[in-house]
Image (spheres, rainbow, N blue to C red):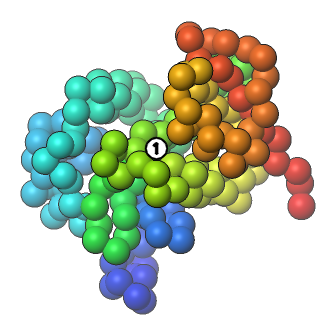
Amino acid sequence: MLLDMESGLSLTPGVIRTERLDLVWLSAPLMDALMTGRRDAVHDRASIVVPASFPEAHDLEFLQFRRAQLESLPEWAPWLVRAVVRRDDRLLVGTITFHGPPGINDLAAPGAVEVGYTIREEERGRGYATEAARGMMRWATDQHGIRHFICGVAPDNAPSLRVTSKLGFEPTGIVDDGELIFDLHVPAE
């Protein structure tokens, strides 16, 4: 088992580390525990502190959708939902995901992945969405050679529009399912 020397926590292949966050891949048992309110099981399995306010209705719908995807498309597992966990207190502050493996995105662009995230309302404004998205995108580039990213944002979601700008996304001029679609091409090093 590989351990982080600072925290003593296991660094499984399912964890993406950023400066302040651990992006913990949610396996089927972890998603099931979250959806049924078994916070102790989530803590015991993944050392994640789940606040009483999670999951809210939209979180539950999102987890149910991703759980069904994982069931029917297990090969998508690495690309699906992760808990955004603040490392210093292990608190779940949100979730982040790709919509699927390369090619599954609002532009149907081969080789591109689409990132989506939600940060719990009481944790917003601290840069977690930007940091988590950068971590996911870095993982996709470093581990899978992905250089094209997509993001869809509702036009009235000012905080997420700021995140896309901070990350360097550019508007495509396309609106899909009520969302403005942005893309980002990462140059080869």
- Identify which residue is drawn at 53% across, 66% down: 18
- Identify which residue is drawn at 62% across, 12% down: 176
Residue 164, percent from left and from top: 66, 40
Q: Residues within 10 Å of mark 1 (few under 14, many from 20)?
A: many
Q: From the viewer's perspective, tell me whether residue 156 is left or right of residue 31.
A: right
Residue 45, percent from left and from top: 21, 61
* Residue beneath disc 1: 96
Mark 1 is on which residue type?
Answer: Ile
Q: Is residue 93 placed above or below 104 in the rendered structure?
A: below
Q: Which residue is at the front of the view, 171 or 126?
A: 126
Q: From the viewer's perspective, tell me whether residue 136 is left or right of residue 26.
A: right
Q: Quadrant of the C terminus?
A: bottom right
Q: Which residue is at the front of the view, 21 or 166?
A: 166
- Identify which residue is drawn at 62% across, 54% down: 134
Q: So how many labels did they put on this image?
A: 1
Is residue 145 visible in the rendered image? The answer is: yes
Is residue 136 visible in the rendered image? The answer is: no
Residue 110, percent from left and from top: 76, 27
Q: Which residue is at the front of the view, 156 or 10?
A: 156
